[in-house]
Image (tube, helix red, strand yellow):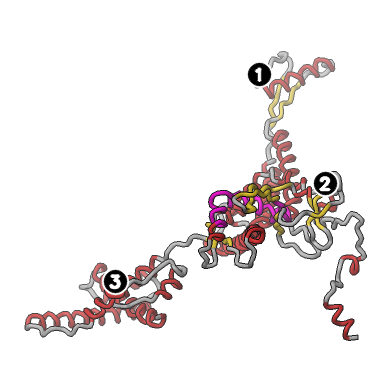
Amino acid sequence: MAAKKTGDLLSELATHQNATGFISFLNILPDPDPVLKKQGKNLSIYKELTSDDHLFSVMGTRIAGVRSKEWAIDRGGSKTRQAKIIDDLFKNRIKPFELMGAIMEAPFFGYSVMEVVWERRDGLYLPARIVGKPKEWFAFTPSGELLLKTKANPSGESVPAFKFLVARSRASYENPYGEKILSRCFWPVVFKKGGIRFWVTFAEKYGMPFLVGKKPRGTSKEETEALADQLENMVQDAIGVIPDDASIEIKEASGKASSADVYERLAAFMNASISKAVLGQTLTTEVGDTGSYAASQTHDQVRGDLVDEDTHLVEDTINTLIGWIWELNFGGNSAPIFSLYQEEEVDKALAERDEILSRTGVRFTKNYYMKAYGFEEGDIEVTEASVAAAQSVQSFSETPPKPKSADALDAQSKAQSTKEQEQEILSGVLRILDSASTYEEAIDAILGAYPTLTLPSLQNTLERLNANSMILGGAEIAADQL
């Protein structure tokens, strides 16, 4: 009995055949996409959707979220010749941003396939070209294995190792083809095109005035038809000649503006649906005359999550390629890692604070700079000169004061008195600010309580006291991080 239990651990029980009775003589698992199943077509119908201007725009925005990042090859701290070969390959031979574009078709079509054409160069197997191939040429088995459909074997045949890179978006055992964003855009684009077609017909019909021709009773059919032809020509040429016993009346299609709004609202609603399917939100493309800063921040964060997901997809696919190169030529498990990153600006406020603290004698460690500014090991070095300079500033600040003259003591007494006055004014100002409901009310109350105080002097006092507080607070934080 125990042997049977351990034997079950080594086999897969929940399979398509066991659970659903699925048996395919062609060894191909059909794409479970609901739109493709209902339409009975392949991925070519999704390619046709990209002719829609709005869909094309938001797709470009989604792709740009990844391609706008910087890329780097991390050698894992190793400066070996093999790692340098990979680094040079991506800098000089492979075009990473073109490869990213091919990989980024996966979120829209579910998966993308790229064929690696190898060459033998300098005794190594290296990619000569990486070409994105039509996805309709491929299929998957129930176990998720990639198949190439050929003329000789339309049912699909297995592909050789190290030959085809496959990127799949949110693929699963149930759906190895991946989830398709364009599947969610299919009906919005179809309804939008239909609505615009009716909108154009409506504009042709009611956008121009009607010309009503009048003829006396008893006019022959031929003369009536001739007048109708003249009216038709008048619509195009704006001129016409009619008998003197006939008349023409112009009828405006009034009251139809509200009917035309229906088509415009339909197109706007479908555009919003497309934006949500591709970007996860609508504000960046549909904000119009409404919206708020807080809402835009929230929507940008949602889209940022999707960019992170796409980034992982690109990194995983390219690192698979690097793993192939490494295995074919060098072996081992220490292959370099490809990564994407967003160039960040230095926090100006943090840098200014650290500069002020360094002038007071505070010394920052190398670990602090790495954590605060995102430096990596080897990017910075704390030199002896910088340490000596900091020590000299500190020792200077700790030098005992020299004996002062009577004039110096008098100046010191006046300065102390001025400082006490400033502190008293500050306390009063803070009490007024706490009780005031608006800034205007607070300013009036301050100037009323201190008639000799001007706004510039008040501003200077507050800035000086605030700077002292910031230095003391920053020194405490820095001391905790040392």
Residue 135 point in image, percent of width and height: 75, 49
Rendered image: mark on residue 385: 3
Amino acid type indicated by mark 1:
Ile
**Relative horizontal placement of residue 61, taking residue 482 as reference (left or right):** right
- Vertical placement of 362 versus 345: above or below? below
Helix, strand or loop status at disc 2:
loop
**Relative horizontal placement of residue 225, taking residue 413 as reference (left or right):** right
Dot 2 or dot 3: first in sequence order is 2
**Disc 1: which residue:** 239
Which residue is nearer to you in this view: 85 or 466?
A: 85
The answer to whether residue 100 is magenta is yes
Dot 1 or dot 2: first in sequence order is 2
Which residue is nearer to you in this view: 382 or 309?
A: 382
Rendered image: mark on residue 150: 2
Query: Residue 54: in sight, yes or no?
Result: no
Q: Residues within 10 Å of mark 3 (few under 14, many from 20)?
A: few
Give the residue furthest to the left.
406
Q: CA distance from mark 1 to mark 2?
A: 64 Å
Residue 247 point in image, percent of width and height: 71, 20
Range covered by the magenta-colored residues = 85-114
Residue lying at 39% horizontally and 65% vertically, measured from the top left? 348
Residue 5 point in image, percent of width and height: 87, 82
The mark lying in front, picked from 1 and 3, is 3
Which residue is nearer to you in this view: 125 or 86?
A: 125
Give the residue furthest to the front.
123
Position of the N terminus, as image quadrant, is bottom right
Which residue is nearer to you in this view: 215 or 100?
A: 100
